[in-house]
Image: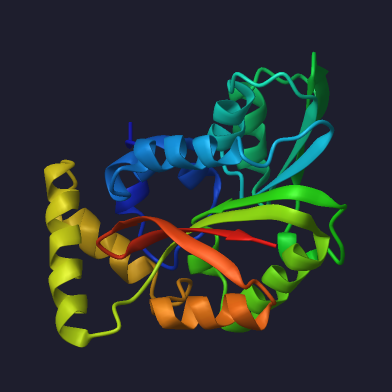
Amino acid sequence: MKSKPTLSSIEGTWRFNDNVAENFDKHVNQSIPHYKDIQQYVTALSEWFIKDNTLIYDLGCSTGETIKNICKLDVSTNFKIIGYDNSNKMISLAKKKLNLKKSSIKNGRIKIQLKSLDVLKIQKFKKSNLFISILLFPFLNLFERKKLIKNIYKSLSPGGGFIFVEKIRSKNSHFEDILNQMYFDFKLRKQLTEKQILTKSKSLRSSMHLFDQNTTQALLKQCKFKNFEVFYKCFNFIGYIAIK
């Protein structure tokens, strides 16, 4: 019987298909430095924006890990979380992880809603106090990022937060080489093979769009975010918190 291909052995252009979804949680822990820590940081930062009847958006929610962590917070407020992902399989796995029999459920003070939808097709979000996006931006070009960030800013209440994690290029080619090679060493320590690393890299050639830190910060300013700060940085991964 032919074995099922692993996430890192699939050739061709990267797609968030069913196989990627099924292996996603294992893959991100092998591929993203301090991924569990990032989840903890994002969850902790969320506490500053969860007020009574707060609406939270998780854009590109994948298997619902961030939503699960936020629901475990020791807060007494009522709030709603809406998770979007354009993969039906991801949403299916998120429902399973969150023990949801339906796409929308109210569990005591928390209401969770999951939708399979391309976030770029959303014309207007409901008024919200918090947007979260972990590793969605690397798969959006500059025009798409600007469109989405503008939409987020318009939908945020004053004082609301936008927390996002992305992958970037270094501003200097020498540092780019150093950080990339350190990142490859990290993957090898996580027991990925050289072939798996190369195959994954080739598959991302036409689907990943990376920019340097200056470009991201300029984009935030263009979309009217005046207050933002870096809360995480390792190799070519970076986390921002922006406040309206």
Residue 79 horizontal side relative to residue 43, left or right: right
Of the 4 image quadrants, the one containing the C terminus is bottom right
Decide which of 84, 176 is in the foreground and name it.
Answer: 176
Q: Position of residue 205 (x, y in %)?
A: 38, 75
Q: How many marks?
A: 0
Q: Is residue 168 left or right of residue 17?
A: left
Task: Give the residue displayed 33% in from the left and 40% down from the top.
Answer: 29
Residue 9 at x, y percent in the picture = 30, 52
Left or right of 50? Residue 132 is: left
The residue nearer to you, when weighing 18 against 62, is 62
Q: Residue at x 66, y 78 (%)?
A: 146
Q: Colour scheme of this structure image?
A: rainbow
In the rendered image, the vertical position of residue 11 relative to residue 75, given as above or below = below
Q: Quadrant of the N terminus?
A: top left
Q: x%, y% of residue 11?
A: 35, 61
Q: Is residue 192 above or below residue 138?
A: above
Looking at the picture, tell me which residue is in the foreground, 2 or 238.
Answer: 238
The answer to whether any part of residue 113 appears in the image is no
Q: Height in image: 233 above or below 38?
A: below
Residue at left offset 61%, top offset 79% = 221
Q: Is residue 69 something that shows in the picture?
A: yes
Q: In the rendered view, tell whether residue 78 sits above or below residue 24.
A: above
State the image quarter where residue 96 is shown.
Answer: top right
Q: Position of residue 153 (x, y in %)?
A: 74, 66
Where on the picture, by quarter, is residue 78? top right
Give the left or right position of residue 133, taking residue 2 as reference: right
